[in-house]
Image (cartoon, helix red, strand yellow):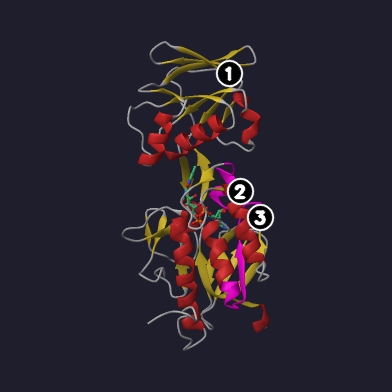
Amino acid sequence: MTENIYDITIIGAGPSGLFAGFYAGMRKNKVQILDSLETAGGQLTALYPEKTIHDVPGYFAVKAEDLVADLVKQTAQFGVPIRLSEKVVDITKQADTGFYEVKTSKTSYVTKAVVIATGNGSFAPKMLKTDEPSVFDEAKLRYNVAEKDQFNGKHIAIAGGGDSAIDMALMLEHVGASVSLIHRRNEFRAHESSVDKLHASKVDVLTPMTIRNISDHKDGLMLTLSNDHQLEVDTIIVQHGFLSNNKDIRAWSVNLKMNRQHFLVDKHYQTSSDNIYAIGDTASYEGKLGLIVEGFKEGPHAVNQIMEKIQSGQLKHAHSTSMF
Ligand SMILES: Cc1cc2nc3c(=O)[nH]c(=O)nc-3n(C[C@H](O)[C@H](O)[C@H](O)COP(=O)(O)OP(=O)(O)OC[C@H]3O[C@@H](n4cnc5c(N)ncnc54)[C@H](O)[C@@H]3O)c2cc1C
């Protein structure tokens, strides 16, 4: 019976869950990762597979989907199962053992500890709203890009003023697209160095501007902007951010303290329930940053805490060459 009991079950196969899974596997825990989506990688796979990431240690620049492929490979070397298309619908605590029963859309598992790495829950892009009602071929409006090279030689409008809009504009300019960036304010909510790169690039920056109307035009679209200027484009890509919800998670039987839709954790990333930890975007604490690197730090810390508790008396692991 104990053979079927997991030491650690990680919920979420985004970067935080994958790296925590790798670390737990390397430390010889019986660990599994569950994810409701069909593919691993969380936001990187679902929302920005082609985007270049510049702030992951050790990489000068890495495409999101390549980082995910490396994380999956790193996790797989210790035989950690990544069970996809398996949504966690409930977690209950067993009264006799103190272990947790994790119920999914397919089956249920018993585990000594849980690491929640569910990001912001299920996510969907914020839709574009034009100033006037618009009717056009919606296949030419996108929220995500799967193969950037297809935009070589095309005229692309990008709507948005955050990091993802600027990154997308620079990325498509780099593959030979002619890019117009439309933003309703003059100021961008993006890293300063990205804004500098944008202004040094050939991207046509149209601010402060909204899109009044979109209509079909030849094989593409005609955008009418708030200053009456008209822009003929092949495609418009909207990068206004994402709406996410953790409503399903709030229905779990274990009653975990939340800060809006994130789990409140202590300095060891433990939630208000013993042996349930939360890492990555879903963890809430003072000073938390929504960056991939944060989850990479939090996962090993949580795993060490769990090991110390469940393997009674085992010390926190430091690297054998650690200096004191
Ligand atoms: C457009 C965009 C660009 C970004 N660029 C950068 C960047 O350049 N650098 C950077 O550091 N960060 C960037 N970020 C932020 C970064 O993507 C997040 O910080 C990171 O994805 C968080 O990883 P995570 O593993 O905690 O969560 P996520 O990546 O959100 O993964 C959570 C996983 O949990 C799964 N899940 C949720 N609920 C359940 C459930 N009930 N059962 C089973 N599975 C469930 C989801 O399906 C998902 O796969 C960007 C974000 C966006 C949206």
Indicate the quadrant containing the N terminus: top left, top right, bottom left or bottom right. Answer: bottom right
What secondary structure is found at the residue carrying circle 3? loop
Q: Is residue 316 above or below residue 168?
A: below
Q: Where is residue 44 in the image (x, y as percent from the top left)?
A: 55, 48
**Residue on which the image places disc 2:** 65
Q: Let me know if residue 254 appears in the view.
A: no
Residue range highlighted in magenta = 24-50
Mark 1: which secondary structure?
Answer: loop
Q: In this view, does 144 lie above or below 245?
A: above
What residue is disc 1 on? Answer: 136
244 vs 70, nearest the viewer: 70
Q: Which amino acid does label 2 sit on?
A: Glu
The span from disc 1 to disc 3 (Cα, nearest Å) is 34 Å
Residue 59 within the magenta-colored segment of the rendering: no
Q: Does the magenta stretch include residue 28?
A: yes
Element class at badge 2: helix
Any mark on residue 311, and which? Answer: none
Residue with the most extreme bottom position: 313
Residue at x-position 52% and y-position 41%:
124
Q: Foreground residue, 137 or 319?
A: 319
| Residue 87 place in picture, x, y as percent | 60, 57
Which residue is identified by label 3?
Answer: 85
Question: Of the residues shown, which amino acid type is indicated by label 3?
Answer: Ser
